Amino acid sequence: MKDFRIRPKDNYINEASWEQLYVLTEHWKSDLVFYHKDLRFLHLLIDKYFMWISNKENIDMVYDIEMNLLEVDKQCALLLAKVNSHLHHLAELVDDPLTYVSPKFREEHQLIEDEMADFVKVFRNNRKEIFKVTEYMIDKEKMVQQLDFTHTKN
């Protein structure tokens, strides 16, 4: 998944009508709104398990993940703003095709698509790391609690 692309075919950006690019951009916006909601879930997941952590090493690990997640949040918000602005420009182009210089606008579209692809890669890696660390922490903390329970029982 090195070259993740959302568009239907290789030369789509140069051949597509403004309406088709608008529909594609609407899909990007919908995806970003979903990712934004998923980021909120990931924050809640971290917060939920953070309060049960007793080991300093695990606290530091969660802190690092939370900082990375905040960066992904920021990237999502910036990209969503770009996509919204791009949608506005596309709406103007649908109404008046001579509003913008076509090659320049299509280049902007390509750049946003590349940013979307990069964001999705970062998001997925971050999400995978959060689940991996959360699972590790739950298992490790359970083991520590069981040892503590066994120790206090004796």
Image (tube, grey):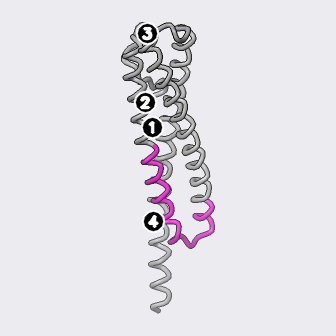
Residue 102, how many percent across, how many down?
Answer: 52, 8
Give the magenta range: 36-60
Give amino acid for label 4: Ile
Q: Which dot marks residue 138?
A: 4
Give the residue displayed 37% in from the left and 23% down from the top.
Answer: 23
Q: Nearer the viewer, residue 95 or 154?
A: 95
Residue indicated by mark 3 = 11
Quarter of the figure that contains the N terminus: top left
Label 1, on which residue? 32
Residue type, numbered disc 3: Asn
Whole-Å distance between the Cαs marked 2 and 4? 34 Å
Q: Give the amino acid at mark 1.
A: Leu
* Residue at mark 2: 28
The residue sitting at 54% across, 34% down in the picture is: 81
x and y percent of residue 117 in the render?
49, 29
Asked whether, in this view, residue 112 is left or right of residue 18, the answer is right
Q: Nearer the viewer, mark 4 or mark 1?
A: 1
Residue at far bottom of view: 154
Q: Pointers 2 and 1 in contact (CB under 8 A)?
A: yes
| Mark sitting on residue 109 | none
- Which of the 4 image quadrants contains residue 60? bottom right
Which element type, helix, strand or loop, lies under badge 2? helix
Q: Nearer the viewer, mark 3 or mark 2?
A: 2
Q: Earlier in the sequence, mark 4 or mark 1?
A: 1
The alpha-carbon separation of the residues under discs 3 and 4 comes to 47 Å
Q: Nearer the viewer, mark 3 or mark 1?
A: 1
Q: Residue at x 54, y 30 (%)?
A: 82
Considering the whole magenta stretch, tell me its main secondary structure: helix
Q: Is residue 44 magenta?
A: yes
Of callouts 3 and 2, the N-terminal one: 3
